[in-house]
Image (cartoon, rainbow, N blue to C red):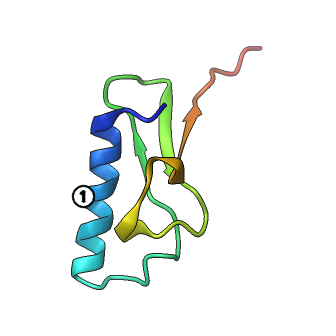
Amino acid sequence: MIKRYIFQEFKNTGSAIDRVKCNNLFSGNLSISDPLDNNSFYITKSGSKKGDLKKSDILKLFFFKKTS
């Protein structure tokens, strides 16, 4: 499940990029670390339209510590 504040950050960033026409919004990915959970981060799916993101366009990934 994508947290509301994370989704809003992606929406705001995608919309800002769209407004200033920095890219075609299909190239590259956006990513963000979760400021409230140091073990997870989020990234947009390949091909998602950054100016019109849906929660299903965002993947949650986890950091794992390497153990010896």
Q: Quadrant of the C terminus?
A: top right
Characterize the local packing of mark 1: few (<14), some (14-19) or many (20 or more) Cα atoms within 10 angstroms.
Answer: some
Q: Residue farthest to the top?
A: 68
Residue 20 x %, y %: 22, 82
Q: For residue 34, what is the image quadrant?
A: top left
Residue sitting at 32 percent across and 23 percent down?
A: 36
Give the number of callouts.
Answer: 1
* Left or right: 44, with 15 as reference point: right
Give whichever of 21, 38 is nearer the camera.
21
* Left or right: 35, with 31 as reference point: left
Give whichever of 52, 33 is nearer the camera.
52
Give whichever of 31, 5 is nearer the camera.
5
Residue sitting at 33 percent across and 65 percent down?
A: 14
* Whether residue 34 is situated above or below residue 64 in the rendered picture: below
The three-letter code of the residue at mark 1 reads Asn
* Left or right: 68, with 21 as reference point: right
Residue sitting at 22 percent across and 79 percent down?
A: 19
Residue 2 x %, y %: 44, 35
Residue 31 x %, y %: 45, 51
* Residue bearing mark 1: 12
Residue sitting at 52 percent across and 70 percent down?
A: 28
* Whether residue 23 is situated above or below residue 62 in the rendered picture: below
Q: Is mark 1 on a helix, strand or loop?
A: helix
